[in-house]
């Protein structure tokens, strides 16, 4: 039988109030519950000691407070990165990673189990699409790490949607999750602290541009000509580079915000100085920033990550023409922190 209880993180405050109203519970209690969830970070009805006992029991009967079961927690050898593999009630596996960069505590979270986009070098793409996550499941990934960090006297500072899945293929759930985490009476995590990364779903980029939000956007580019890009990212056949770039320019014009381009450096494929020049031609006149990261090796793709030297030369070529570029070295490669690498095994 299907569980009649709803995951409490799937509801925004207004919906929670509706449920209270419908059950003849005082509506102001809904806000107390909300604050308990998102400020106190409680995840069991028994923790809500500010509520009458009968109400706690009703909460317990009405809602699910935990959908994600941590299955494995892995630490990188430098302990700067930790990764959790979660199991969902339907046995699907997803993962989320916490990274410490400077004083930032950045979470890299999933929006789908698997991914339908099929990028050849991506472990998540290689496993195919399993299902969308609900907004509450996405929120729960963040809450899990928020609790863990709080117990260490720290807090989440940034959230990037660069785990498993394509956030713009699960747009409504992704945006609702951000709204819930952004709520002033809840976690109050500012919109600028979020970064959505997309493979380049053009109509959704346009829709997102129209929202004029402060959420950061990153585009996974990886190649500056259609032939190469289509061979690695199948979505490029549907939305080729010209269309993608037009949508990117539109986004910058409408929002005035800088755009980030992601580039996984693959040895002898897209890491030459000539390729950097091809990329700089594409980005001419844009307010853009390029993030390059040497490819993380995966089982079903033979390409190798570029060396530090090649990465530095690529960066230098871009910066010559005024395009800022950051080289991120592979963090936590020893814990398979690359997108979907752990979950694709758990699914097997
Ligand atoms: N689906 C979204 C977000 C999740 S992937 C997207 O594609 O943008 C997050 C980033 O990891 C993307 O830039 C993606 O291209 C990159 N990525 C995937 N597999 C990788 C690998 N094996 N090595 C390095 N980067 C990878
Ligand atoms: Fe999906 Fe992003 Fe992986 Fe491509 S890179 S398969 S879009 S998760």
Image (cartoon, helix red, strand yellow):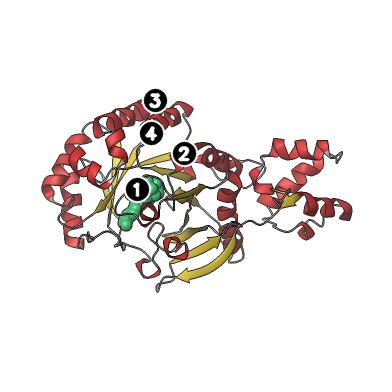
Question: In the image, 186: left or right of 291?
Answer: right
Q: Which of disc 2 and disc 3 is earlier in sequence? A: 2
Residue name at image x 47 percent, y 44 percent? 194
Residue name at image x 45 percent, y 39 percent? 169
On the image, the x and y values in percent for residue 336 come to: 38, 66
Q: Nearer the viewer, residue 347 or 220?
A: 347
Distance in Å between CA atoms under marks 4 and 3? 8 Å
Q: Which mark is residue 254?
A: 3
Helix, strand or loop under label 2: loop
Distance in Å between CA atoms under marks 1 and 2? 26 Å
Q: For mark 1, does the 10 Å Cα neighbourhood hold few (<14), some (14 to 19), or many (20 or more) residues?
A: some
Question: In the image, 233: left or right of 58?
Answer: left
| Viewer-nearest of discs 1 and 2 | 1
Question: In the image, 247: left or right of 80?
Answer: left
Helix, strand or loop under label 4: loop
Residue 27 visible: no
Label 4 within 8 A of ligand 1 by Cβ: no
Helix, strand or loop under label 1: loop
Q: Which mark is residue 95?
A: none
Label 1 within 8 A of ligand 2 by Cβ: yes
């Amino acid at each position: 039988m299907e569980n009649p209880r709803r995951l409490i993180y799937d509801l925004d405050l207004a919906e929670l109030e509706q449920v209270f109203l419908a059950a003849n519970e005082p509506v102001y209690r809904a806000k107390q519950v909300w604050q308990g969830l998102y400020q106190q970070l409680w995840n069991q009805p028994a923790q809500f000691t500010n509520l009458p006992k009968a109400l706690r029991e009703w909460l317990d009967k009405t809602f699910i407070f935990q959908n994600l079961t941590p299955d494995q927690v892995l630490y990188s050898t430098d302990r700067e990165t930790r990764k959790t593999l979660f199991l969902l009630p339907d046995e699907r596996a997803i993962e989320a990673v916490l990274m410490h960069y400077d004083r930032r505590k950045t979470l890299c979270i999933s929006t789908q189990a698997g991914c339908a986009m099929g990028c050849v070098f991506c472990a998540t793409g290689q496993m195919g699409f399993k299902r969308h996550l609900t907004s509450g499941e996405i929120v729960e990934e963040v809450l899990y790490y928020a609790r863990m960090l709080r117990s260490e006297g720290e807090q989440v500072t940034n959230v990037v949607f660069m785990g498993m899945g394509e956030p713009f293929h699960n747009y409504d759930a992704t945006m609702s999750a951000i709204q819930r985490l952004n709520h002033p009476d809840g976690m109050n995590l500012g919109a600028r602290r979020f970064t959505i990364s997309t493979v380049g779903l053009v109509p959704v980029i346009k829709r997102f541009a129209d929202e004029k939000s402060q959420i950061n956007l990153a585009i996974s580019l990886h190649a500056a000509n259609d032939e190469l890009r289509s061979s690695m990212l199948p979505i490029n056949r549907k939305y080729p580079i010209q269309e993608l770039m037009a949508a990117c320019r539109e986004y910058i014009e409408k929002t005035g915000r800088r755009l980030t381009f992601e580039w996984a450096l693959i040895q002898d494929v897209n890491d030459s100085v000539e390729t950097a020049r091809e990329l700089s031609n594409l980005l001419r006149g844009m307010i853009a920033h390029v993030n390059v990261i040497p490819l993380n090796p995966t089982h079903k793709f033979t390409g190798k990550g570029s060396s530090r030297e090649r990465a530095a030369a690529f960066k230098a070529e871009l910066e010559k023409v005024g395009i800022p570029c950051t080289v991120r070295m592979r963090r936590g490669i020893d814990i398979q922190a690359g997108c979907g690498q752990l979950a694709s095994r758990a699914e097997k």
